[in-house]
Image: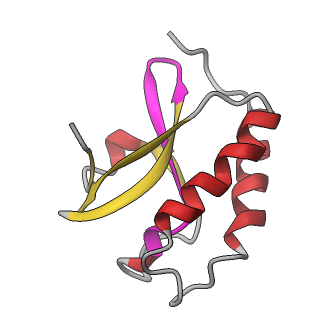
Amino acid sequence: MARELSKQRKEKILTIARRLRKRYPRGKNAGMCIDASHALETPLKKARIPHKFVSGNFNKRYHCWVEIPNNGTTMVLDITADQFSFAFPQVLFDDIKNWPQYVRKS
């Protein structure tokens, strides 16, 4: 079981995500989820943060994101979720259980 992410690790993840998010402007990031999710992998790996690139569906539309284990649950890290609605945050980092829209490809 993965241990709880410390506050420092969470801040590191958010710093990485916010920096990369600048490459994918709001309103112009539709279809950029594969590139954005892969772009997250290198800095996460350098920071030694366990993670996994995931493809599946978001509200029944093909989508990709990154998942990070956290003490028996999974955190979703998505820097293009707002392509579906401006109501979604530009950097989504939360327990996947709070986001039933995310469905992994089986």
Rendered view: 106 above or below 3: below
Tell whether 101 sits left or right of 85: left
The residue at the point 70 percent across, 76 percent down is 23
In the displayed structure image, the side of residue 41 where residue 83 appears, left or right: left
Q: In which quadrant will I find the C terminus?
A: top left
**Which residues are the magenta region?**
69-82
Please state the horizontal and vertical placement of residue 79, each as a whole percent of the image: 56, 64
Examine the rendered structure and indicate whether residue 106 appears above or below residue 14.
above
Q: Residue at x 69, y 57 (%)?
A: 17
Decide: is 105 above or below 83. Answer: above
Indicate the position of residue 89 as horizontal and vertical percent values. 52, 70
Side (left or right) of 83 relative to 4: left
Whether residue 59 appears in this view of the structure is no
Query: Is the image coloured rainbow, by chain, by secondary structure, or in one colour?
Result: secondary structure
Counting from the top left corner in percent of width and height, residue 28 is at 53, 89
Q: Is residue 101 magenta?
A: no
The quarter of the picture where residue 25 lies is: bottom right
Farthest top residue in view: 1
